[in-house]
Image: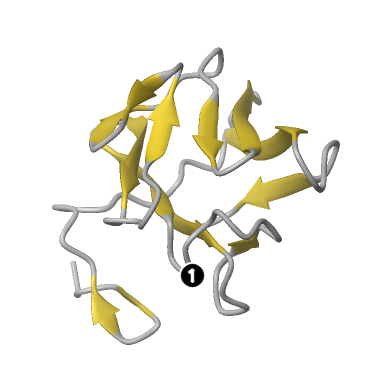
Amino acid sequence: MSAKTIQGEPLKLGDLEELPGEIDARLRIVAGDGKGRVYLIRESAVVLGRDDGCHVVIDDPRVSGRHAIISYRGGEFRVSDLQSTNGSLLNGSPLTESVFNESDDLRLGKTVVRLEVDFREPVL
């Protein structure tokens, strides 16, 4: 697999996998500015932050320019803090890197994001 980059910086996430076609994944903002907004996940890595170049732009002064990344590896979604100034919380605990499940709450500043995943029947 060729090295993937986001904003010119190499990702150090191990081998990213293509998101399987039978997975419909979304990020929903459940608290904070932008509550109710939904972002489709169509790539194997999605950066969240305040910078306009992020896949999911969060307008929250406590969120870093490039705050966190959600990736699909080893058949599961994972979330990592990108050494943000104010840190990230996953279900209330400080986050470095972890599996990211549907029931989990990811807090970036005052914004809370939740993963939603649906599975479709594969097209034969």
Q: Left or right? Give the position of 83 relative to 7.
A: left
The structure residue drawn at horizontal position 23% and vertical position 66%, both measured from the top left corner, is 11
Residue 18 in view:
yes
Question: Where, by quadrant of the figure, is residue 27 drawn?
Answer: top right
Q: Residue furthest top?
A: 103
- Depth check: give the residue in front, 18 or 38: 38
Vertical position of residue 118 compared to residue 61: above or below: above
Q: Which quadrant does the C terminus fall into?
A: top right
Which one is nearer the viewer's eye here, 124 or 31?
Answer: 31
- Where residue 69 sits: x, y (%)? 40, 52
Amino acid, disc 1:
Gly
Residue 78 figure quarter: top left
* Spot occupied by residue 51 in the image (x, y as percentages of width and height): 56, 75
Give the quadrant of residue 2.
bottom left
Q: Look at 42% across and 30% down and name the residue there.
A: 89
Question: Which residue is the site of mark 1?
Answer: 65
- Residue at 53% across, 56% down: 63
Compared across the picture, whether 19 is left or right of 4 comes to right
In this rendering, the answer to whether 120 lies above or below 79 is above
Q: Label 1's element? A: loop
Nearest the eye: 72 or 91: 91
Counting from the top left corner in percent of width and height, residue 91 is at 46, 16
Is 42 located above or below residue 102 in the figure? below
Residue 44 seen in the current view: no
Percent from the top left, x then y, of residue 95?
30, 32
- Which residue shows up at 61% across the image and 28% down it? 114
